[in-house]
Image (cartoon, coloured by chain):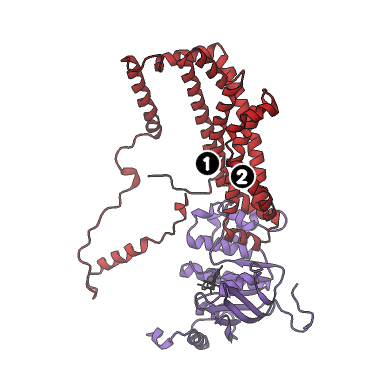
Amino acid sequence: MATDVHRPVTAHAVRVEGLTRAFDGRAVIDDLRLDIAPGEFVALLGRSGCGKSTLLRILAGLDRDIQGTALVPRRRAVAFQAPRLMPWKKVWRNVLLGLPGRPERAVAERVLDEVGLGHRIGAWPKTLSGGEAQRASLARALVREPDLLLLDEPFGALDALTRIKAQRLVGEVWQRRGCAVLLVTHDVEEAVLLADRVLVMDGGRIAHEQRIDLDRPRGITDPRFAALRAGLLERLGVDTAAEAS
Amino acid sequence: MSISHAPPSSPEPDISAMSKSERPGAERPGPGPLDLQPVVPAFSRGFRVPRWVRRTTGPIVLLAMWQVLSATGVLTSDVLASPGRIAQVGWDLVSDGSLPTAMGTSLRRVASGLLLGTVIGTGLALVSGLFRIGEDLVDAPVQMLRTVPFVGLIPLFIIWFGIGEAPKTAIITLGVTFPIYLNVYAGIRGVDSQLVEAGESLGLSRWGLTRHVVLPGALPGALTGLRYALGIAWLALVFAEQVNADAGIGFLMVQARDFLRTDVIVVCLIVYAFLGLLADFVVRSLERLLLQWRPTFTGR
Ligand SMILES: Nc1ncnc2c1ncn2[C@@H]1O[C@H](COP(=O)(O)OP(=O)(O)OP(=O)(O)O)[C@@H](O)[C@H]1O
Ligand SMILES: [Mg+2]
């Protein structure tokens, strides 16, 4: 486990310091610092290409060409930006892939039901629609019961209703499991709705941090919600007055 | 084959054009009346000839032409016997038992050479595909040997292995090993690194990654290799049996040549063709079974 022995008081689920990752001499992540407490839900915003997915891959332990320290728990699960299902395995086998022991089909059935894919459990991944594949990928991450859940825009290809359901599901898994979550998203509303803390990434580091202290379940109609949303949008460089018209 | 990966991005412009034409009151300068064309359902494109009829038409036409040429005397029987004559000779060869015996011998040789070559080729490809050190040690020698024409090794093999079954099996094995090696190796190295990464993130061990990600990903390539290997196996068989043999289809052909029996030679060639067709059918079935996860472009 990645608890830092020098700081027995504040345990961390993620501890990143002085992290730098460069592609061909261009630092995409530049001296980044990030702490996530156990059980904390953190949302990560930022312009396209600012390095969010790169950060996620590093935290998942998949990219080791880094400088600096990055401490993460051993049990992690990732839902990638692209579904990345094994095309030669049926959906339910994809979900169970890599689980310890010999998990039963019912386990996959349950979690696929939760993401609304119960009827496509025996399908080949290449026959799934974009959103279905994304939900299968989400189910594959959720079934792992991790200590750190890394989600890279998991709701990108979903319609409004399915999206709300999936968001609720992630919220439930988070509360039941008590795992730390890092959710990359482009949707400020979604970030404010789900997260304890919203980070804005820019220039290779965390440029802005916003704590969200609203009670759950949160409503979009709450004026404080709107204020937080507007503040974050401003941080992202969106002119809220123009957007409102 | 990768056409199935094309992103479904094309419909969007059509939809926007349609919705535009439905709102004639829109302020923008309209595109004018659109020239609509019907989307014809695939099954209603006129009368369709059954697949098997279409597939057998070519050979039958060829056969008919051959018969006509023979009957009119353009093709004399010492150049090429007529189809009717060949059918007769074929039947005689089958009923006196010489053709089935020869086929059995030849099939056994191909099978053992194919099996050995596949095992060796796959084994080498796994070593050099999965491990970088294996690549450094194995790949260069194999690539070097590959360019040696294996048929040229027949004299050497006869010196080494004598004149029994061994040199024939060896020559087929050698011919089969390289296409299997090349395709399995390329298949392994062509596996999508994103999928390997995903497997890693799911906590798969090295062996688990190999079993669940790398090998299934290399399977399409491996089957292509098997197809090539089958073609080469028959070729190698013909060479091996004609240089030095006392049984098998090739031996039958050499005998027929000495007696100027073009009819027997043609029967043997037809047998080769049918065995090749049969082998191809086996690989096709194997592909359908093992690659059913892959929707591919099937032609229009
Ligand atoms: N393997 C690579 N080689 C070179 N450059 C890379 C590589 N991977 C990512 N990059 C670059 O690093 C930058 C950050 O990429 P990343 O995928 O982290 O962006 P992102 O913040 O996730 O963007 P998006 O919101 O569009 O997904 C981009 O400019 C990208 O082009
Ligand atoms: Mg990304």
* Residue at image point 77% right, 84% down: A9
Amino acid type of the residue that numbered disc 2 sits on in the rendered structure: Met
Residue A103 is at least partly visible in this image = no
Mark 1 belongs to chain: B
Q: Nearer the viewer, residue B181 or B60?
A: B181
Between the residue at mark 1 and the residue at mark 2, the CA separation in whole angstroms equals 34 Å
Q: Residues within 10 Å of mark 2 (few under 14, many from 20)?
A: few
**Quadrant of residue B228 in the image?**
top right
B216 lies above or below B198 = above
> Taking A69 as reference, is B267 left or right?
left
Q: Quadrant of residue A33?
A: bottom right
Residue farthest along the left direction in this orientation: B33
Ligand 1 is within 8 Å of the C-beta of the residue at disc 1: no
Q: Colour of chain A?
A: purple
Reading the image, the residue beneath label 1 is: B288
Q: Quadrant of ligand 1?
A: bottom right
The image shows residue B134 at horizontal and vertical percentages of 69, 51
**Could you tell whether B247 is left or right of A189 in the image?**
right
SS at mark 2? helix
Q: Residue at x 33, y 19 (%)?
A: B69
- Residue that label 2 marks: B144
> Disc 1 on helix, strand or loop?
helix
Question: Dividing the image into 4 quarters, which one contains the C terminus of chain B?
Answer: top left
Q: Amino acid at mark 1?
A: Arg
Q: Which chain is red?
A: B
Nearer to me, A110 or B279:
B279
Q: Chain of mark 2?
A: B
Sequence-earlier tag: 1 or 2: 2
Q: Position of residue B209 (x, y in %)?
A: 66, 55
